[in-house]
């Protein structure tokens, strides 16, 4: 089989694999049926990953979606993420219900989210409160921030027709309420035993329940929300820049740039989509750089950066609700390897062709050319020759008289080594 046939078969295999993987995503996903309720697990630290996941769930929810239920069990989270989640709930076109499971906690950030929900259900043994904002590490609070958050909490409670005074005290005095107490003072709507009871209370006992799990994008954002990870990224970026100054390398420079970009994302100074576009540009640039370096490293780095950029950029993920990590990782890695392999193969071939071509500025093109001696040349006395319409200093191992035809047999810097034609 010829090389052309091999390449055609290879490209067909890649195309078939991409179609199969994408078709698998469309089969797994699909639009929501009428009467569908989505359930998101909020049983963790409230961070940017959860905020992004809720935003995308609301954005891509089918018009017939009845509600989104947040199963809330948290000791708190980050202020920026909390504000983003509350804003999403308040502006949501879909009804948002919060359910605090048996023994669950809606502390700190969880209290704001629970109060903002259209309906707040709490199971026996659950508690809500302790919503005073604190500095990371438990270093106290700022009265200005506390007052602002108390006013915000009170305004949210008034909007949802909850006990605004009781809600405000969760911020100013760190008060906590059990499920029964929260219902009695009109902070929560009802005490229920399970998620099925929540559906019954909302008039959705026969609704189709779809669970929304964290996908790769949300997981990455959650990791980057951690202040410890932010510190590592900033330190790593600074260290790699220092190493790059002392010992310049392509890998070190790219790694420093990526670490700094991810640190900006962690700080909230750039969005996930902006980060994705930057990573895609770096990845494409890295693959193009393969033309110059040619050992495969830049192509591999470019493939990884492009994959990470695509993960962060891809937001319309209907398939995330029945997400199969093994299938995605396996299929994704295969696609990346195949596409990067094809790109690397063609770039390598292009580089080989370019390397074989002689530069128009290379003096090697003069070897074998015929010229004329314009002065006498002796073994220890260079002379002048005319070759390819230019005058050159030339030397020879033999005596060449002026006017004789010569052939260039070597290059020494800017001097030509010549011999009599035919000798």
Image (spheres, rainbow, N blue to C red):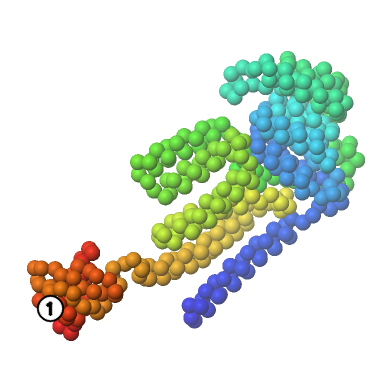
Residue 291, x across and y down, in percent: 44, 61
To which residue does mark 1 refer? 401
Q: Is residue 356 above or below residue 44?
A: below
Quadrant of image for the C terminus:
bottom left
Residue 179, x across and y down, in percent: 80, 25
> In front here: 417 or 181?
417
> In front here: 144 or 92?
144
Residue 114, x across and y down, in percent: 78, 30
Q: Is residue 400 left or right of residue 206?
A: left
One can see residue 216 in this view: no
Residue visible at 73% across and 35% down in the picture = 85
Task: Give the farthest residue toward the right.
Answer: 203
Q: Secondary structure at mark 1?
A: loop
Q: Is residue 265 left or right of residue 152?
A: left
Q: Is residue 397 left or right of residue 175?
A: left
Task: Give the farthest residue toward the bottom.
Answer: 422
Q: Is residue 419 above or below residue 158?
A: below
Residue visible at 55% across and 52% down in the picture = 281
Q: Which quadrant of the figure has residue 66?
A: top right
One can see residue 388 in this view: yes
Residue visible at 80% across and 30% down in the picture = 116
Q: Is residue 151 above or below residue 303?
A: above
Residue visible at 51% across and 64% down in the picture = 343
Q: Dot 1 surroundings within 10 Å: few (below 14), some, or many (20 or more)? A: some
Q: Is residue 136 above or below residue 239?
A: above
What count of labels does the image hold? 1
Q: Which quadrant of the figure has residue 29?
A: bottom right
Q: Which quadrant of the figure has residue 70?
A: top right
> In front here: 55 or 41?
55
Residue 121, x across and y down, in percent: 82, 31
């Amino acid at each position: 089989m010829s090389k052309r046939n091999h390449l055609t078969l290879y490209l067909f295999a890649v195309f078939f694999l991409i179609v199969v993987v994408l078709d698998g995503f469309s089969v797994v996903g699909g639009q929501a049926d009428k009467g569908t309720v989505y359930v998101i697990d909020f049983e963790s630290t409230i961070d940017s990953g959860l905020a992004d996941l809720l935003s995308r769930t609301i954005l891509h929810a089918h018009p017939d979606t009845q509600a989104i239920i947040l199963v809330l069990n948290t000791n708190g989270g980050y202020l920026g993420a909390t504000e983003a989640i509350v804003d999403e709930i308040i502006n949501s076109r879909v009804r948002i219900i919060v359910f605090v499971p048996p023994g669950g906690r809606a502390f700190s950030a969880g209290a704001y989210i629970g109060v903002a929900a259209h309906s707040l259900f709490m199971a026996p043994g659950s508690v809500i409160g302790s919503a005073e904002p604190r500095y990371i590490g438990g270093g106290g609070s700022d009265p200005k921030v506390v007052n602002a958050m108390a006013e915000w909490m009170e305004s949210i409670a008034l909007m949802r027709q909850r006990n605004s005074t009781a809600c405000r005290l969760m911020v100013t005095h760190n008060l906590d309420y059990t499920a029964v107490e929260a219902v009695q003072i009109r902070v929560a709507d009802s005490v229920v035993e399970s998620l099925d009871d929540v559906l019954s209370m909302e008039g959705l006992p026969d609704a189709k329940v779809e669970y929304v799990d964290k996908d790769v994008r949300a997981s990455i954002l959650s990791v980057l929300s951690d202040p410890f990870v932010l510190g590592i990224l900033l330190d790593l970026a600074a260290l790699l820049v220092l190493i790059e100054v002392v010992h310049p390398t392509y890998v070190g420079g790219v790694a420093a740039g990526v670490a700094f970009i991810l640190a900006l994302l962690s700080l909230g100074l750039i969005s996930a989509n902006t980060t994705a576009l930057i990573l895609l540009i770096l990845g494409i640039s890295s693959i193009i750089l393969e033309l110059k370096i040619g050992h495969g490293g830049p192509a591999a780095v470019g493939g990884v950066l492009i994959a990470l950029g695509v993960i962060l950029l891809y937001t319309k993920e209907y398939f995330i609700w029945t997400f199969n990590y093994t299938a995605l990782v396996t299929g994704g890695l295969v696609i990346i390897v195949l596409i990067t392999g094809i790109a690397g193969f063609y770039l390598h071939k292009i580089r080989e062709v370019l390397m074989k071509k002689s530069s128009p500025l290379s003096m090697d093109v003069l070897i074998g050319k015929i010229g004329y001696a314009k002065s006498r040349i002796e073994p220890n006395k260079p002379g002048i020759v005319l070759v390819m319409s230019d005058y050159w200093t030339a030397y020879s191992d033999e005596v060449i008289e002026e006017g004789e035809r010569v052939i260039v047999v070597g290059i020494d810097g800017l001097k030509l080594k010549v011999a009599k034609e035919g000798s």
